[in-house]
Image: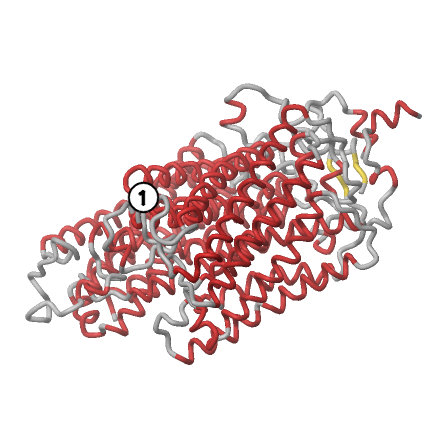
Amino acid sequence: MSADTHAHEGHDGHGHHGPKWLQHHFETPIQQFESSKLGMWAFLAQEILFFSGLFVAYGIFRIAYPEAFAAGSMQLNKIMGGANTIVLLFSSLTAALAVRSAQLGKKDEVTRYLFITIICAFGFMVIKYFEYTAKFEHGLLPGIHWNPSHLVGIDAPLDHMHVFFGVYFMLTGLHGVHVLIGIGILFWIMMRNHNGEFSKEYWTPVDLAALYWHLVDLVWIYLFPLLYLI
Amino acid sequence: MATATAAHAHEPDYLNAKTGIGSWIYTVDHKRLGIMYLASILMFFAIGGFFALLVRIELMTPGETIMSPTMYNKAFTLHGAIMVFLFIIPSIPGALGNFFLPIMLGAKDVAFPRLNLLSFYIYVLGAILAVASIAINAVDTGWTFYTPYSTRTDTAVVWVTLSVFILGFSSILTGVNFIATVHKLRAPGLHWKRLPLFVWGMYATSVIQVLATPVIAITLFILIMENVLTLGIFNPQLGGDPVLFQHFFWFYSHPAVYIMILPGMAIVNEVLATFSRRKIFGYMFVAMSSVGLALVGFLVWGHHMFVAGMSEYATLVFSALTFLVAIPSGVKVFNWIATLYKGSISFESPMLYALAFLVLFSIGGLTGLFLGTLSVDIHLHDTYFVVAHFHYVMVGGTVFGFLAGLHYWWPKMFGRMYDENLARVAFALVFIGFNMTFFTQFVLGSQGMPRRYYDYLPHFAPLHGFSSVGALVLGAGFLVMAFMFIRSLASGAKAPPNPWGSAGYEWATASPPIEHNFHGQPVMTRGPYDYHLATDEELFDGFPEEAAAKE
């Protein structure tokens, strides 16, 4: 082991001459970019495992109570769920376009695409709000308020149908929390872009925010058919 | 390296580079965060140890000794929960990992320093909630929070599970940080085959932290919702499945056993190599066995539930997979012994802890095979045999590994030596006290003494009494150790950069290290255990300034 004491030393004794967005502990921009990207992918892996518990619970209880799950699924509004799927898929497209624009250094386009993505995210939450309130009014929230009415396709609530709605509210609720966090992140990135922090050389945060947003989309892609369609 | 240190002798170390309380609270320096973690986990180790002593004193005599049955339930729950979630899981990665992983990579910091700070404060928030839960109404469920009891008890289950939920994210973010750091921040020349085995161990640990911890997070989230909203996922009265909780819980908590033991093994590599002045025998096998343990650890959770009502075929598969764990563990132990063979061994206190680790971990690991055997487990399940087994792994393994590391790196972290004689006295007390406490419990368990019971039959009284006396000896050992370390901080002799004459990378910088760890970018030209390639200057254990003055 030897110390290369001079080659990398800058004027501050330990730093290096680099752009101001290059953090002090990285030697090169590519090292910083690759670290950030790898860290984000590792984080996304944990997100998938975070949701996995509820997906497994869904599978187990669907096998245990198939009729109750089929009946519960019938109570969900496929139109609203489908509309939300289209909204989220479209927002993933605009998020990807924002990254492309950032790579090309087109600052105003990035702001525009991120803005559309945020609007879509709000649209998703609005539709979800109407869905949730309808379910609450129909007494479909498990627990002390459980008192189903306005049932579709069945005359009386089935035993264990509340388990379906327990899984439904936790899966969609956690997903909704992720959408809200996504709105916050996208807004923050949009403002940073507006302030001119990003360039053709440095667009990592836009890329990472979009990656997160794609994950939010991906989770919904599985939620929609499992809860609404089958 | 030594020349460089002398040339820059004016540069202050990380402890003095910045001053004021703000320089600690908002620090993003991995070394300061490591020290903050160290202080926090040691505090919780003391609290968890206090509850352990309460439990053992209560069990010293049959019937009521010092507390009621309800208090006893709370005491053993708090001992377990605090030791697992607030001490042992964050202990080595948070404290020693944060401090030494970047230095061993020749990096200035971890990949995401601000995330590291966030991770620490998430830990603090979780710890505050856990302490609050004690004040509100301490839980009495056992540290596993098994349903259906945890959905029925009126103790503060929601608070403590929320605390564990939050603590999990601290663990996950540390894991994400270390993975990116190991992949991307290695110094020039530090390819994977030169990576210190401590780094390999931390890397394998991080993979488990990232992939297993979210599962406990979602499990406890469901449990909280179950308590708050009565959903019916784990609660059998509502059509839920309490065994599903056990599956989810152990899907995390078994890999979590490797989050605990892998870092202990990782430290033992460094200490054994240094104090036998020898390259680790079978380096790549040892490195890969860490990764192997991390992977196999994901497949064996069912062995906690052999009597919980699984199908016989499932128990067969889980039992067979459990035996697989013995292969990478055995690879490690045999390679360590081969490392010692013909080594030039010296017995300073870190080495004593590392050698004790070899003995105690082997006992803990082999008794695990008894429990992985279906027919034997039916008799031993939920007896003191299980308690003794996991304390041999968790204390005899992880805590002894942690103590080996703490003694080994103490001079590097604080720039002070400690009283070696006092350290050996503490070691003797801890080693004897530990074996008195827990070897006895193997006997108790094999005779049928169930775990968690408040009272016991009179014929168990001699062994229980002996075990409790052992716990007091163990406690005394830790008091001596605390005194020894505090005295070192106050008046210990100044530590040289390389007091043990190690070839490890972290000893090439000053004690304590400067803020950016190294002057300039280090370039690794040999492995961390290549004693045959290290120069006399690198292994020199004195002060470079003094050496220069003598010449």
Nearest the viewer among B355 and B427 is B427
Quick check: B173 left or right of B481?
left
Q: Can residue A98 be seen in this view?
A: no
Q: Is residue A147 visible?
A: yes
Residue A155 coordinates in the image, percent (x, y): 6, 70
Determine which quarter of the picture holds residue B499: top right
Determine which quarter of the picture holds residue B309: bottom left
Quick check: A148 left or right of B493?
left
Q: Circle 1 sits on which residue?
A: B138
**In which quadrant is the N terminus of chain A drawn?**
top right
Colour mapping: secondary structure
Residue reaching furthest to the bottom: B313
Residue B419 coordinates in the image, percent (x, y): 70, 33
**In which quadrant is the C terminus of chain A drawn?**
bottom left
Residue A34 coordinates in the image, percent (x, y): 58, 47
Question: Amino acid type of disc 1?
Answer: Ala
The residue that appears at 73% across and 27% down in the rendered structure is: B494
Residue B210 coordinates in the image, percent (x, y): 49, 53
Determine which quarter of the picture holds residue B112: top right
